């Protein structure tokens, strides 16, 4: 039987036509897939752009909140927790300005933020503003909450589907924490503060501007002379008070031992015994210091003043908790270790920073020797938020044994009950340190090794509470 070639040829032709149609369909599918792939790639670019902008906004909010909390810490308002002297609005207004300025300086997607909202909180709950003048405005731990918004963000591809502008926002809350009286609101009792880089001038718990009354309560660490006196007139509390730290060692003696009554002037150290508005200090035993400038490397004591003694832990309330006096040398005198190292620390020979207490809040003006001035970043007289002239001094319990330091002993344990944050104005010709009080933080003599602690470079440390 002969084959039907016509039928076979017809089938082949149909198959070729189907293949041709399939080739066109495949190209259409590939084209559609390419559009989808390109669209997803475009959207991913915009998503990454918004993600990066969100991260930059968070950084801006964090920096702004911390900057504002720094202002509250340095202003001393935590030394007036009941707002008795009414200086909260001034500190609040300055903190708001700083938060807004810091947020504006931190660009988000190569442009300034479009909105900065600043609120103040009391214990994280009750929102207050800068017009609040009553009691309990902020307690001992004022918190500042900053929200930044960056609107009108540029997008590259999503505008094809939407004409609406994109925006990102971020919020942060920072706190200036003062441990004084914290036992009244902390569930576990008083919260201790262990600041770093404490200067080795141990002073008694005696306020020379308040007839020798305690700086802090031994029972709960609360500040005893609450309030602010920005003009230094004495009409107010301890914040803004000026006095002189003077060595308790007798001038001319090689050491401070009490041998034969020729070592210490007062045993225990006292107040206003060496002149009006004077507070005795004794040297602390030194650990290992870092960041020491070359002008103060004559002794470990000098290094601890001009640098940072990182290994000595000034733990509150613990008898013999690592803090010892050192009476084996005399730190005072015109050319003593205190004078040499402090002049180096504050750049007194070149031009130290200056504290302007009027008007409130306190203003710190950079001196010619400030590193930011010498590097060309600032001009002399510019306002600064930090200074090497701001130091922390430990307060010890002079009512707890040993009340008097042992005869002929180089070291004796002391119990730390609080800290003073002071601004060093200068060193006088006798080697005495003239200071103004910026802050007081108390932690009583009841703390133990189990007491929760807050760490920082200041006795009123700033810390970020939330970042979201």
Image (cartoon, rainbow, N blue to C red):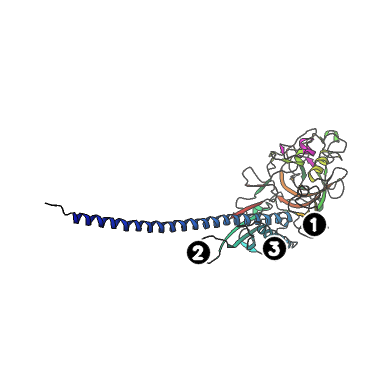
Find residue 376 and report its horizontal and vertical position in percent: 76, 49
Q: Residues within 10 Å of mark 1 (few under 14, many from 20)?
A: some
Q: Residues within 10 Å of mark 3 (few under 14, many from 20)?
A: some
Task: Identify the residue under disc 2.
Answer: 160
Specify the label residue 135 is tagged with. 3
Q: Which quarter of the picture shows residue 466?
A: bottom right
Up the image or down, 368 lies above or below 111; here it is: above
Circle 2 — which element?
helix
Residue mark closest to the camera, 3 vs 1: 1
The magenta stretch spans residue 329: no
Q: Which quarter of the picture shows residue 250?
A: top right
Task: Identify the residue under disc 1.
Answer: 357
Q: Which residues are magenta?
A: 281-302
**Residue placed most toward the observer, 191 or 343:** 343
Circle 3 — which element?
loop
Distance, label 3 to label 2, CA atoms, is 56 Å
Distance, label 1 to label 2, CA atoms, is 58 Å
The magenta stretch spans residue 295: yes
Distance, label 3 to label 1, CA atoms, is 23 Å
Find residue 197 and report its horizontal and vertical position in percent: 71, 43
Up the image or down, 124 lies above or below 334; here it is: below
Find residue 176 and report its horizontal and vertical position in percent: 67, 54
Circle 1 — which element?
loop
Query: Closer to the N terminus: mark 1 or mark 2?
Result: 2
Residue 138 seen: no
């Amino acid at each position: 039987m002969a084959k039907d070639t016509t039928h076979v040829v017809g089938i082949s032709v149909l198959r070729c036509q189907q293949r041709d149609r399939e080739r066109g369909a495949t190209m259409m599918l590939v084209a559609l897939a390419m559009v989808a792939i390109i669209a997803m790639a475009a959207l991913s670019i915009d998503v990454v752009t918004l993600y990066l902008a969100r991260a930059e906004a968070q950084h801006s909010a964090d920096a702004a909140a911390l900057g504002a909390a720094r202002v509250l810490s340095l202003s001393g308002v935590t030394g007036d927790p009941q707002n008795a002297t009414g200086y909260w609005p001034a500190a609040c207004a300055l903190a708001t300005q700083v938060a807004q300025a810091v947020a504006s300086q931190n660009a988000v997607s190569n442009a300034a933020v479009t909105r900065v909202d600043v609120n103040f909180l009391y214990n994280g709950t009750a929102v207050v503003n800068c017009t609040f003048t009553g009691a309990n405005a902020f307690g001992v731990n004022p918190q500042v909450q900053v929200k930044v918004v960056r609107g009108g963000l540029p997008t590259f591809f999503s505008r094809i589907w939407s004409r609406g502008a994109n925006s990102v926002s971020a919020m942060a809350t920072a706190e200036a924490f003062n441990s004084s009286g914290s036992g009244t609101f902390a569930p576990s009792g008083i919260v201790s503060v262990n600041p770093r880089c404490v200067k080795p001038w141990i002073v008694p718990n005696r306020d020379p501007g308040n007839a020798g009354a305690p700086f802090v309560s031994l029972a709960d660490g609360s500040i005893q002379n609450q309030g602010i006196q920005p003009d230094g007139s004495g009409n107010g509390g301890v914040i803004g008070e000026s006095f002189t730290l003077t060595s308790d060692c007798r001038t001319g003696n090689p050491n401070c031992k009490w041998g034969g009554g020729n070592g210490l002037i007062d045993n225990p150290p006292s107040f206003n015994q060496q002149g009006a508005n004077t507070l005795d200090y004794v040297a602390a035993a030194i650990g290992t210091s870092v960041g020491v400038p070359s002008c103060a490397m004559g002794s470990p004591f000098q290094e601890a003043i001009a640098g940072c003694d990182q290994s000595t832990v000034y733990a509150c309330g613990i008898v013999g908790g690592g803090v010892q006096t050192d009476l084996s040398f005399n730190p005072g005198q015109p050319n003593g270790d205190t004078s040499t190292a402090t002049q180096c620390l504050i750049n007194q020979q070149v031009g130290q920073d200056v504290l302007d207490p009027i008007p409130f809040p306190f203003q710190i003006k950079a001196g010619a020797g400030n590193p930011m001035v010498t590097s060309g970043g600032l001009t002399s007289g510019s306002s600064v938020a930090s200074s090497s002239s701001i130091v922390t001094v430990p307060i010890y319990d002079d009512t707890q044994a040993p009340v008097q330091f042992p005869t002929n002993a180089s070291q004796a344990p002391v119990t730390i009950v609080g800290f003073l944050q002071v601004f060093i104005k200068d060193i006088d010709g006798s080697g005495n340190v003239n200071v103004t009080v910026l802050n007081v933080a108390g932690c009583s003599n009841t703390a133990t090794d189990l007491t929760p602690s807050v760490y920082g470079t200041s006795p009123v440390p700033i810390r970020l509470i939330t970042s979201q």
